[in-house]
């Protein structure tokens, strides 16, 4: 597992097109995620002590460039393959 320099809990937004990674400007709701971790810990034999959450989308530059075309293509692919890999 890899960690970046920012040790404060934060999430990333990754651009599907150019791969740019930004910090998501939100304060995570720890309660819901803690509940999820607890539930997962109960459902599996894993000792869950954290999580990684990544948001995916298009950065503003790519949105301007592609004007929504790329998004629609990937949305279609996502539905066909069951997810972005
Ligand atoms: Zn981009």
Image (cartoon, rainbow, N blue to C red):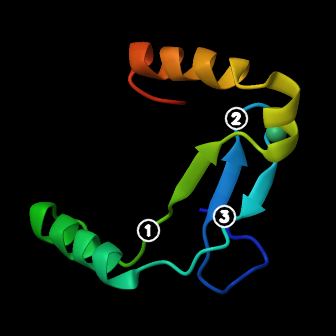
Sequence-wise first label, 2 or 1:
2
**Disc ID at residue 16:** 2
Q: Quadrant of the N terminus?
A: bottom right
Residue behind mark 3 = 2
Taking 63 as reference, is 78 above or below it?
above
- Is label 2 within 8 A of ligand 1 (CB to nearest ligand atom)? yes
**Measured along the vertical axis of the image, is residue 1 above or below residue 70?**
below
User: On the rendered structure, is 27 left or right of 18?
Assistant: left
Where is residue 82? Give x, y as percent: 38, 23
Residue at screen point 61% across, 15% down: 73
Viewer-side residue, 65 vs 21: 65
Please identify, in this view, whether the residue under mark 1 or under mark 3 is nearer the observer. Answer: 1
Dot 3, crowdedness within 10 Å: few (<14), some or many (≥20)? few
Q: Does the residue tagged 1 have its C-beta within 8 Å of any atom of ligand 1?
A: no
- Kindly state the secondary structure of the residue where label 3 is placed: loop
Kindly check if marks 2 and 1 are in contact, taking CB atoms under 8 A apart as contact: no
In terms of secondary structure, where does tag 1 sit?
loop
Q: Which residue is mark 1?
A: 51
The picture quadrant for ligand 1 comes to: top right
């Amino acid at each position: 597992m890899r960690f970046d320099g920012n040790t404060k809990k934060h999430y990333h937004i990754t651009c599907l097109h150019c791969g740019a990674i930004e910090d998501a400007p939100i304060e995570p709701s720890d309660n819901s995620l803690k509940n999820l971790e607890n539930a997962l810990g109960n459902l599996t034999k894993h000792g869950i002590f954290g999580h990684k959450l990544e948001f995916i989308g298009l950065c503003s530059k790519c949105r301007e460039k592609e004007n929504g075309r790329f998004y629609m293509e990937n949305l279609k692919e996502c539905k066909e393959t069951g997810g972005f890999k």
